[in-house]
Image (tube, helix red, strand yellow):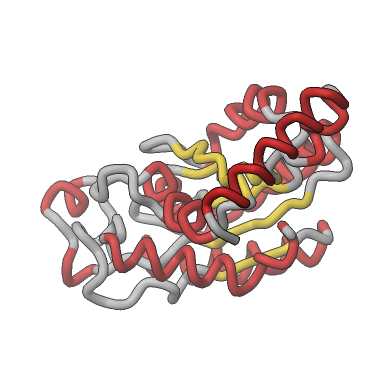
Amino acid sequence: MNRRASTTWFAAVLSAALTMGPAMIKTITKTEVICFGDSITHGAKVNGHSWVYFLAESHYDIRFINEGRNGRKTSDREEILPILKKYPDARAIMIFLGVNDLKDGNDSMVSICVRNVDWMIKTVRAANPDMKIVVLSPCEIDLAAMSRTNIRKKYNQNTLRSLNTLDRRYKALAMKDSVDFVSLLHAVSAGNYVDGLHPNLPGQQQIAKMVWSKVGKLFN
């Protein structure tokens, strides 16, 4: 299609939308997918270019909404409430939380994460029964690359061990609650962490690729 024909087509679509009103406009609105997470979702250490950014860049027909916040834990579960109100027509939500709960982690902390995510799943369903839910397990950490700051925060071997346990527990929770699950435990290659905790740009791209390969079909 040449530029003149393309311009004519767009003008015709716009004219039809204005003529038919909101009903027509709604049909061409992008599918909304909420990405609810922590600093990895927000895009810390990569200038906001997180896995959400790369999904949006690759799939223009879908609006991937970045609702990440630095430092968010599963215990901040009630932060999901205003987001659900803000996007009542979203088709899906991806919940990507847990690593910040597991500083010097143990099994008790893992169980708290599972209970909090279970609460979020039930809350989403109460707000919008038709919204698809995807639980993403956190990526592992790179102890060899861990920064001094993160060592002081106690991201350590116990954290890594707990992340492996959490991956299994999230998978079981997803089966119990009949929601989708994507394991990101091994999604990021060794060497693709900025500070042992946050993925660099290639690491964020690896997350985006894994997420889309597992659940992209849900959003079409």
Residue 112 visible in rendering: no
Percent coordinates x, y for residue 188 in the rendering: 37, 72
Residue at figure coordinates x 29%, y 57% from the top left: 197
Rendered location of residue 93, percent (x, y): 67, 46
Residue 113 located left or right of residue 176: left
The one of 125 and 103 positioned closer to us in this rendering: 125
Q: Residue at x 77, y 34 (%)?
A: 89
Above or below 204: residue 114: above
Quadrant of the image occupied by residue 146: bottom left
The quarter of the displayed image where residue 136 is located? bottom right
Question: Residue 153: horizontal and vertical position, in percent?
Answer: 24, 46
Q: Image point 63% across, 28% down: which residue?
A: 83
Q: On the picture, is 109 further left or further right than 16?
A: left
Quick one: which residue is furthest to the left in this view?
A: 148
Q: Where residue 180 sits in the image (x, y, percent)?
A: 73, 63
| Residue 214 seen from this side | yes
